[in-house]
Image (cartoon, rainbow, N blue to C red):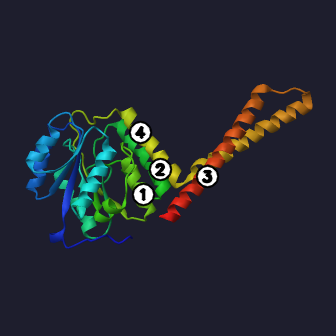
Amino acid sequence: MTENTSIKSDKALKIAIGLPAFNEEKNIGKIVAELLEKSYSVIVCNDGSSDSTGIIAEKMGAIIVNHKRNFGYGAAIGSLFKKAKECEFDILVTFDSDGQHRISDIEKVIDPIKNNLADIVIGSRFLGDEKTEMPKYRKIGVKVITDLVNSQTGKKITDSQSGFRAYSKKIFSEINLSESGMGVSTEILIKANQKKIKITEIPIKILYDGETSKHNPVSHGTSVMLSTMKFISIEHPLKFYGIPGILFLITGLFFILWTIQEFTSSGTIITNISLIGIGATIFGMMLMMTSIMLFSLVSVVRERK
């Protein structure tokens, strides 16, 4: 397990609760007040809200980071990371500003970091006796993405898309985020896996009342899936591009040999078969070349780092 950075005694720990917020004036005041009442420091990233989210949070006593426009969830998490590092906090807990997370669960996700058992703690909606009653379509989507992430990291995470997480100082000091959208949850896990960082999960319960998400489930799922594929392609280019490239190349050669055999026996060329053979062969070669070039580029970048 990678050693945690600057973990102090419980009394000396500086803990911040980070809230990414976009048009949450109905909920933000109550949440900030309850968190401050529990003696937590609160950082709110006002991600270009058109309502009074930022004003309310600031008046309540939260540390505010204002975005001039709505950059997205990932950009908000990135700003929370930077502010937590700047203010020299020891632990950052990301917490939704829509009222779905329970403040009583915060200590549960913090404990493994306090005890040097992990650097990232995920609040999982699928563990424990109090499993969250999540809409079925969302449960399927989260499972598909989580399985994809696990296949690349070798972990056995149950909820890769949970926004309720605790991070040690090591994480928000050393991991630089580039994803501005919902795929940031995946980016963090993949980059943490590269650094051999210990990740664990704690069971939590989400309070779903009324509208469960402001994001369109199709666009949300597509965004996360594309982001996940992007980071997997960078992390494992030989597998991501090379294996499909070999399969396309084999398929293309098969159809080309079929074309040659037909021409030899009958003197005619079957156009469809020959075109499939040529197209698959070219595409396969392009994928294989891409895998080699990207692998070489990533290797050079990592060596320089």
Q: Is residue 109 visible?
A: no
Left or right, residue 106 beside residue 169: left
CB under 8 Å between discs 3 and 1: no
Residue that label 3 marks: 293
Please tell me whether mark 2 or mark 3 is closer to you in this view: 3
**Where residue 194 appears, x then y in whole percent?**
45, 61
- Distance, label 3 to label 1, CA atoms, is 21 Å
Mark 2 or mark 1: whose residue is earlier in sequence? 1
Residue that label 2 marks: 231
Amino acid carrying mark 2 in the image: Phe
- Distance, label 2 to label 1, CA atoms, is 9 Å
**Could you say which is closer to the camera, residue 288 or residue 176?**
176
Name the quadrant of the N terminus. bottom left
Mark 3 or mark 4: whose residue is earlier in sequence? 4
Amino acid carrying mark 1 in the image: Lys
Please tell me whether mark 3 or mark 1 is closer to you in this view: 3
| Residue at position x 67%, y 39% in the image | 283
As displayed, is residue 217 above or below residue 295? above
Mark 2 or mark 3: whose residue is earlier in sequence? 2
| Residue at position x 13%, y 48% in the image | 32
Q: Quadrant of residue 173?
A: bottom left
**Where residue 99 appears, x then y in whole percent?**
18, 43
Mark 1 or mark 4: whose residue is earlier in sequence? 1
The crowding category of the residue bearing disc 4, from other C-alpha atoms within 10 Å (few below 14, some 14 to 19, many at least 20), is some
Residue that label 4 marks: 223
Mark 3 or mark 1: whose residue is earlier in sequence? 1
The crowding category of the residue bearing disc 2, from other C-alpha atoms within 10 Å (few below 14, some 14 to 19, many at least 20), is some
CB under 8 Å between discs 3 and 4: no
Residue 191 — which label? Answer: 1
